Image (cartoon, helix red, strand yellow):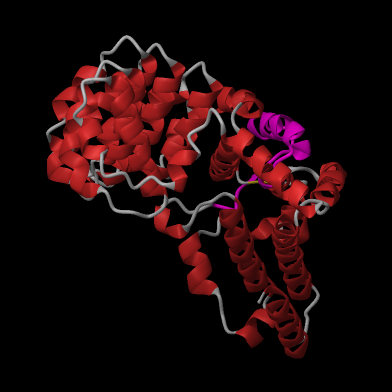
Amino acid sequence: MFGLQASGAAASWVVGRMGTDAHLYDDPDDASIPELLDSRFDADKVDALKRLLALIAQGVDVAHLFPQVVKNVASQSLEVKKLVYLYLLHYADKRQNEALLSINIFQKDLSDINPLVRAWALRTMAGIRLHVVAPLVLVAIKKCARDPSAYVRKCAAYALCKLCDLIPDENAALEEIVDTLFSDNSPGVVGAAAVAFKSVCPSCLPLVSKHFRRLCETLPDIEEWTQIVLIEILLRYVIARHGLVKDSLLFASDLPTEIHGVTDSDAVASVPTQSDSIVNGVSDTISSIMLFRHYIEQCSGSSDREGNNLELSSVTANNNDDVTILLKCTSPLLWSRNSGVVLAAASVHWIMAPIGDMKKIVGPILFTLRSSPDAAYVVLLRYLLFGFILLISSMHRYGAKNNCWRSTRTIFSGTFY
């Protein structure tokens, strides 16, 4: 009986692998690969390239075949060209000099009638991380950023992320490309442009101002992981331009009106010792501002090194147009299937929504806690941190004692670590 079951399982395994390339992973090391690469038949070249990629997937170094693979980049077969590009992307960093020999082919493929070929050529060019090639890649990205195909424009946005550190003197040109991509009609391109913005010019918030309303309206339609990035950008822009909402939970907790106008440098210079801060209410408020700023910058994916610190001392009304549209467009994302999107959207409401609207995020947060343990852990840490900040604010307001502060700090440090 057990023999019949074993035979049946083996037969099912064989049938399941028929018509696939799974057999290449069983015995990919074929001595005939060099001969197949030199064959005049595309089918032989495809078989050889698939075997090479199978070896790469298993951790085998096949860089010694680079010259034989590169010469097939000019093949008219789409399948051969695709496999060659995948191989080149993997070894472009290790064999940069040999990869330079294919630059002319890549530039020619940028004008191919097939958008897939144009996208593959751009991705491979961007993968050759040489300063001498960077100007050519920049020209290619400018061209592809206005390509008729949305897929090619999306690849152009992601190529910017690889190029920005090679040509730091071309920030103006890179920002111009990001500006072009932000005005694109395709949601996929806009999402990729948000990723490029975060890598290329995260502090250039005036660039967001030109497209703010349209970016908010496009937010529900872009890909999930790029939604997180775009929410961070929009949140930081609103806070930098308008400050906190007067009726929000953050502002209502401990931000009296007499401290408006305090800058970062003033706050740092004015923060006294711990014993003095308990007595001095204004200094307590400044400390709270600094805590809030740290939390918001963590939520919005920013930091002080970006050179664009948040000014939390300014205040705006809850009927501000930018705040209203941001809250409106992030509300549907509270019920996203992606826990990261839910967390990002909920952070916007934590920071910007009036206290009366905070009930909107309770259900989504509780629903997120039912997901994987890892996601639930991250969500709990984020809102435990937020509650911790509000607790410190209350302690400052009501004159908490030093031992209370030490006890709370010990409890929360044990919780986080």
Q: Position of residue 36 (x, y in %)?
A: 25, 32
394 in relation to 91, above or below: below
Name the residue rendered at 58%, 62% in the picture.
Answer: 294
Residue at 60% from the left image edge and 24% from the top image edge: 218
Residue, x 26% and y 39% (percent of image)?
Answer: 32
Where residue 399 sits, quadrant-wise, is bottom right
From this view, report whether residue 167 is shown above or below residue 217: below
In this view, the residue in front, 378 or 250, is 378
Q: Is residue 161 visible?
A: no
The verdict on residue 314 being magenta is yes
Residue 403 image offset from top left, x and y in percent: 75, 90
Residue pictured at 63% horizontal, 25% vertical: 221
Residue 73 placement, left or right of 414: left
Q: Nearer the viewer, residue 176 or 131?
A: 131
Question: Would residue 7 be seen by someone viewing this image from the given angle?
Answer: yes
Q: Give the left or right position of residue 40, taking residue 381 as reference.
A: left
Extent of the magenta region: 311-340
Quadrant (top left/top right/bottom left/bottom right) for the C terminus: bottom right
* Residue 344 placement: quadrant: top right
- Could you say where residue 4 lies in the image, as x and y percent from the top left? 76, 47
